[in-house]
Image (tube, rainbow, N blue to C red):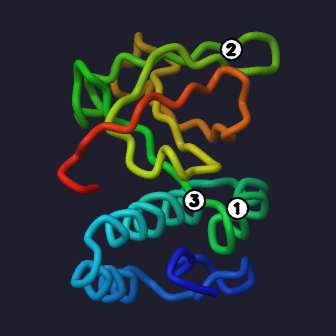
């Protein structure tokens, strides 16, 4: 149990607390190291929360324990052309047999160098505009995943 699992359920190895507890911990961390605070913030309030709220039971069983105890996660939304405007993202997803193929690139992705797990946003049905956007869980060892050079983002 620790800072990376504040919002993860105790039965998954997390602390089992909520958003307010995460905010208090992140505020204290930021007094010492804002970059570490940002990493803990993204990990808890974006990734763990997304799996808790929107993940299937199978996804929660597979990923929450890892995220709470030893795997850093990365939230992959931003793109060069659209920034963090999810409605304008260009990354596409298409099915290829039983697999999904993601085509596009992301940038300014916090935790990318350390992450073992990525939640990547892509549009699986552009005819539905923003309603076609979904999130995909991508493991670091996925053969199509490429991590680019680390960008200088004001210390984070």
**Is residue 123 shown above or below 74?**
above
Q: Which residue is mark 2?
A: 95
| CB contact under 8 Å: marks 2 and 1 | no
Q: How many marks can you see? A: 3
* Percent coordinates x, y for residue 118 in the rendering: 56, 43
In this rendering, would 152 be left or right of 25? left
For residue 119, which quarter of the picture? top right
Choose the circle earlier in sequence order: 2 or 1: 1
Q: Which residue is mark 1?
A: 60
Q: Residue at x 30, y 33 (%)?
A: 86
Choose the circle earlier in sequence order: 3 or 1: 1
Q: Residue at x 50, y 58 (%)?
A: 47
Please identify, in this view, whether the residue under mark 2 or under mark 3 is nearer the observer.
3
Q: Nearer the viewer, residue 3 or 18?
A: 3
**Is residue 64 shown above or below 77?**
below
**Is residue 127 shown above or below 64?**
above
* Percent coordinates x, y for residue 83 in the rendering: 22, 31
Q: Residues within 10 Å of mark 2 (few under 14, many from 20)?
A: few
For the residues marked 2 and 1, what is the alpha-carbon distance in whole angstroms? 23 Å
* Percent coordinates x, y for residue 21 in the rendering: 38, 89
Secondary element type, mark 2: strand
For the residues marked 3 and 1, what is the alpha-carbon distance in whole angstroms? 15 Å
Secondary element type, mark 3: loop
* Percent coordinates x, y for residue 121 in the rendering: 46, 33
Q: Which residue is mark 3?
A: 72
Q: Residue at x 47, y 63 (%)?
A: 43
For the residues marked 2 and 3, what is the alpha-carbon distance in whole angstroms? 27 Å
């Amino acid at each position: 149990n620790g800072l990376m699992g504040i919002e993860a359920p105790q039965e998954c190895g997390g602390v089992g607390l909520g958003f307010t507890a995460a905010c208090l911990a992140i505020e204290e961390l930021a007094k010492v190291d804002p970059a570490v605070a940002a990493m803990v913030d993204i990990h808890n309030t974006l990734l763990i929360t997304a799996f808790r709220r929107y993940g299937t039971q199978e996804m929660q069983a597979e990923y929450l324990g890892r995220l709470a105890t030893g795997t850093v996660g990365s939230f992959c939304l931003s793109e060069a052309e659209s920034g963090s405007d999810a409605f304008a993202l260009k990354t596409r997803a298409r099915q290829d047999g039983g697999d999904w193929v993601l085509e596009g690139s992301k940038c300014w992705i916090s935790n990318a160098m350390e992450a073992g797990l990525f939640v990547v946003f892509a549009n699986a049905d552009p005819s539905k505009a923003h309603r076609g956007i979904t999130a995909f869980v991508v493991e670091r060892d996925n053969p199509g995943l490429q991590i680019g050079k680390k960008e200088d983002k004001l210390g984070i």
